């Protein structure tokens, strides 16, 4: 399954640093060094609205899961809240507040109920905000360098933070005490993401790698290599099968189960998946934003497998093919005949024959 760029959004006049997509899936928010936050229709690529009035570049945006509220964090140490219905802006914190961060705000994350917001900052702290009361309730300390990224698990019980101190911390949201500390990266940990099932943490680093960790135990599962520069942004696909990672030079798509690189796209950080997983948003060239969609077309040269016969005949490989060659053939056929991709009348029968053949191969190998 390949991805094709369908829209190239223009309008920002400086680097685009951050994305957020509303849970409804049709509104994209982008924050930029041009001191604005823009809203876009994800389906059509059309510009909806631009929020002005910030004093510095925007490094973080997040939609509330339960209300028409958008928050942004900038290099002026300010968290602003934007009402999507009225377009009214309100400051959650500013330089005059004793509860404010004292340096740049790099990351924002809501709990699933939208009641609590976490913010990560260059001041080495994470602040917890009570949104209904518009107050800061707690400051988490322990990192010894800038907190680049924060993420909250889908069940709302765990917060994960990534820091320039080369560590990841896993905080229990109820007690806030004794965070588990994960080490292994040799450079800044610049980004973290949590899978939708809440089982896996992904971390991206200036060491050009992505590491996958088991959230409950902190065990390192695998390390993905292939980027040519620091990894600045990460996102899990909603189905949990893939992860997208980006640097300032490329965007890579990975299969989590096999830890294999699936595709490299001509984009850059940041990155975000739509809630249905069918749309991918990346940075582009010249302050632009790229919208990618899955390509479902089957080429004229598509392999037509047999519906019956020995497994190697159905998969179209030699009987003595290596396991790797068989796996490649199987994945190629899936891309062509999976019913979500191929809507022809015989796709379901083809897919059943392909899966049965591969199952026989696994039994014999």
Image: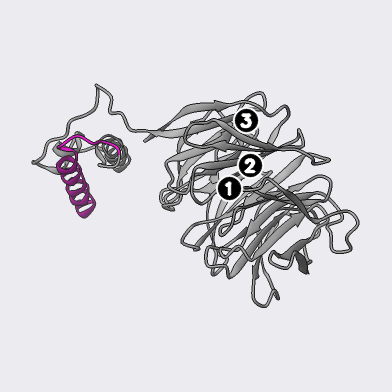
Q: CA distance from mark 1 to mark 3?
A: 15 Å
Question: Residue 302 vs residue 5: left or right?
Answer: left
Q: Are marks 1 and 2 in contact (CB under 8 Å)?
A: yes
Q: Is residue 83 above or below residue 281?
A: below
Query: Could you classify mark 2 by the number of other residues whose Cα lies within 10 Å: few (under 14), some (14-19), or many (20 or more)?
Result: many
Q: Which residues are magenta?
A: 341-365
Q: In the displayed image of the protein, which residue is found farthest to the top?
A: 300
Residue nearest the observer in this picture, 282 or 260:
282
**Residue at horizontal 63%, vertical 47%?**
84
Q: Residues within 10 Å of mark 1 (few under 14, many from 20)?
A: many
Dot label at residue 249: 3
Q: Residue at x 68, y 45 (%)?
A: 87
Q: Give the mark nearer the N terminus: 1 vs 3.
A: 1
**Residue on which disc 2 sits:** 231
Residue at 63% of width from left, 42% of height from top?
Answer: 231
Q: Quadrant of the N terminus?
A: top left
Q: Which residue is mark 1?
A: 210
Q: Quadrant of residue 140?
A: bottom right
Seen at 73% across and 37% down, the residue is 36
Residue sitting at the far front: 86
Mark 3: few/some/many CA within 10 Å (<14, 14-19, 20+): some
In reply to whether residue 346 is colored magenta, the answer given is yes
Disc 3, SS: loop
Residue situated in front as seen by the camera: 105 or 349: 105
Give the farthest residue toward the bottom. 175
In the picture provided, is 308 more to the left or to the right than 293?
left
Give the spatial CA distance, label 1 vs label 2.
7 Å
Vertical arrangement, residue 231 with respect to residue 213, above or below: above
Q: Position of residue 333 (x, y in %)?
A: 26, 36
Is residue 150 something one can see in this rendering?
Answer: no
């Amino acid at each position: 399954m390949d991805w094709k760029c369908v829209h190239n959004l223009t309008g920002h006049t400086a680097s685009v640093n951050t994305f957020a997509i509303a849970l409804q899936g049709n509104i994209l928010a982008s924050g930029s060094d041009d001191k604005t936050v823009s809203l876009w229709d994800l389906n059509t690529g059309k510009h909806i609205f631009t929020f002005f009035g910030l004093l510095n570049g925007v490094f973080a945006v997040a939609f509330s899961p339960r209300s028409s509220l958008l928050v942004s964090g900038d290099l002026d140490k300010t968290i602003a809240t934007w009402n999507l219905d009225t377009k009214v802006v309100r400051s959650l914190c500013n330089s005059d507040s004793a509860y404010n961060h004292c340096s740049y705000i790099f990351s924002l994350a809501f709990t699933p109920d939208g009641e609590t917001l976490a913010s990560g900052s260059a001041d080495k702290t994470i602040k917890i905000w009570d949104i209904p009361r518009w107050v800061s309730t707690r400051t988490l300390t322990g990192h010894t360098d800038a907190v680049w990224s924060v993420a909250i698990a889908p069940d709302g019980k765990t917060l994960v933070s990534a820091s320039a101190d080369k560590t990841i911390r896993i905080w229990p949201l109820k007690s806030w005490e004794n965070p588990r500390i994960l080490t292994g990266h040799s450079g800044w940990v610049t980004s973290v993401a949590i899978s939708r099932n809440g089982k896996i943490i992904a971390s991206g680093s200036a060491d050009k790698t992505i590491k996958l960790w088991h959230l409950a135990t902190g065990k390192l599962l695998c390390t993905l290599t292939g980027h040519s520069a620091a990894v600045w942004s990460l996102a899990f696909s909603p189905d949990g099968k893939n992860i997208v990672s980006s640097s300032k030079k490329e965007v890579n798509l990975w299969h989590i189960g096999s830890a294999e690189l699936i595709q490299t796209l001509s984009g850059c950080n940041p990155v975000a998946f739509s809630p249905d997983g069918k749309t991918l948003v990346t940075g582009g060239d010249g302050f632009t934003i790229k919208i990618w969609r899955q390509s479902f077309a089957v080429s004229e040269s598509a392999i037509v497998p047999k519906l019956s016969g020995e497994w190697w005949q159905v998969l179209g490989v030699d009987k003595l093919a290596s396991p790797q060659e068989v796996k490649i053939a199987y994945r190629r056929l899936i891309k062509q005949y999976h019913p979500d991709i191929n809507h022809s009348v015989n796709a379901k029968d083809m897919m059943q024959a392909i899966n049965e053949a591969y199952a026989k191969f696994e039994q014999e190998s």
